[in-house]
Image: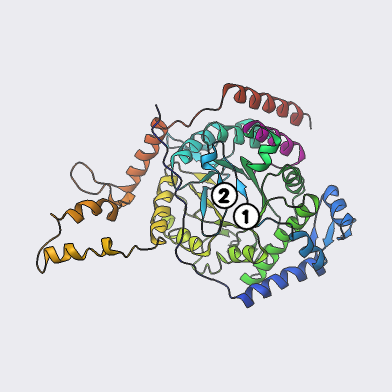
Amino acid sequence: MSLPRPEIEPIRSAYRLHYLKDEQLDLLQEATLEILETIGVRFPSDKALRILADHGGQVDHSSGVVKFPRQLVFKALSSLPRYFCMGAREPGFDLHLDQGVTYFTTDGCGVETVDFETHQRRPSNKADCGRMARVADYLSAIAFYWPMVSAQDYGVTAPLHELDAAWNNTVKHVQSETIMGEIPARYAVEMGTVIAGSREELRRRPPFSLVVCTIAPLIQDKEGIEGALVLAEAGVPVGFLAMPTLGTTAPATLAGALAMGDAEIISAAVLIQLASPGAPVFHSLMQAWADPRTAAYVSYPLDGRARYAPVEMAHHWGMPSLGACYGTDSLQVYTWQSAAETALDTFLVGLTGAEIVTGMGLAETYTLLYPEQIILDSDLYHRARHYLLEMEVSPETLAMDTIRAVGPGGNFLGQKHTRQHIRQSLVRAITHQLGPDNHYRDPHDVAIEQLHWILENHQPEPLEAATQVELARLLAAAEREMSLR
């Protein structure tokens, strides 16, 4: 029998750091509006172009480029909800987005895994998605699950099988980044309705959400945007993620790259609000750098300023933000680089107040799953979570009576106050787990052991048999329809 699942422990920061001044946020927003008004964004979707044209967008049908009068932008965004619910299979794990609370998820969607048993690299599959969902279901650092690797053994229906593997292995909210196109999105809505119980409940407590990547510079993805329209209509939260690369797909300056990426996100958010006013939409911008010698994609240069400025940009628009953490450029787990690049991430994004954050557990720039990486990343998360908690200063914690009792030159080992508090005072990190000889163990060995313990001992509550049958029916129907395209 599975042991009780720990409660989710989100970051509740007692502190706040502002990366950008109000004047800087205004300048960035003004630049976004100028890009939208005078340069425009390409929408390679007839459906999107019709919606935008019907509502006052300046549409060039020959190029697919749309220019947005600023009054249209502000009118459309006025219907955006600032916060919303990201539902779960079990109501106790619903995420009610709110100020001062930051929820983390895994990273996705990698294409390779280091095998759980053989430790050899191989293409990922649906079983990997399910196993990592079970691990995420148990970890208190992870509030919702982003399928970490792709179900490559299921071809064109892989995104739907990733949802299925997730819902069968976690009671937490699931977020996809691979549902692309109108047909897969409609099947995803049907699957979500089965999990929620009804279309009304799907809208009230959506058990999944979607991240859609834009294409830099200044293009929307046809399949992504058309799938997003379907999900938004059903009330499923949709986020737009811009990933400008400084020097290749974006200006070589942070401000220029951020303004351009912001224009991509805001143009998509405007479309969604025009089509489905009040639909839940979130903002995400994750800039990277191009190595000028090789054109390689670099996530963690020495100067990574403004990594979390996009969180403040989102809030300046009145939108919740999906921040970015982890995903080291390191080729291997458990190296100096793998920890050094990501060590400050959770702390800094917690200080900015992002509502949701990706993504634990992948290496090699978000593409490779070392299963034990999620345990190591979770440890970094909890270090930051504790750093950001407010220290209690009270008569009990000041311990004046105990200090008087011990006096100069004594020790506190035998004091009742010490017995009451020492276990809460010293919270062991993964680096301080004791072996039989009372020496600290190798953290990598501990991570592997903890991972296998979870897989052997934790099994989330299964879906009802009728629900599993209905999901299987929808997957089979999707396979038939999509294989004919």
Helix, strand or loop at mark 1? loop
Specify the quadrant that holds the C terminus.
Answer: top right
- The number of discs equals 2
State whether the magenta stretch is mostly helix, strand or loop.
helix
Query: In which quarter of the view is residue 295 placed?
Result: bottom right
Question: Is residue 253 at least partly visible in the picture?
Answer: no
Question: Is residue 465 at least partly visible in the picture?
Answer: yes
What x and y, as percent, mark residue 158?
Answer: 64, 35
Residue nearest the observer in this picture, 18 or 310: 18
Relative to 224, does residue 193 appear above or below in the rendering?
Answer: above
Relative to 37, does residue 207 appear above or below in the rendering?
Answer: above
Disc 1 target residue: 83
Density class for disc 1 (Cα within 10 Å; few <14, some 14-19, many ≥20) is: some
Label 2 or label 1, whichever comes before in sequence order: 1
Label at residue 96: 2
Q: Is residue 81 left or right of residue 369?
A: right
Q: Is residue 146 left or right of residue 473?
A: left
What x and y, as percent, mark residue 149?
Answer: 56, 40
Please give the range of residues in magenta. 178-195
Question: Which residue type carries mark 2?
Answer: His
Helix, strand or loop at mark 2? strand
Q: Residue at x 78, y 66 (%)?
A: 36
Is residue 306 found inside the magenta-colored segment of the image? Answer: no
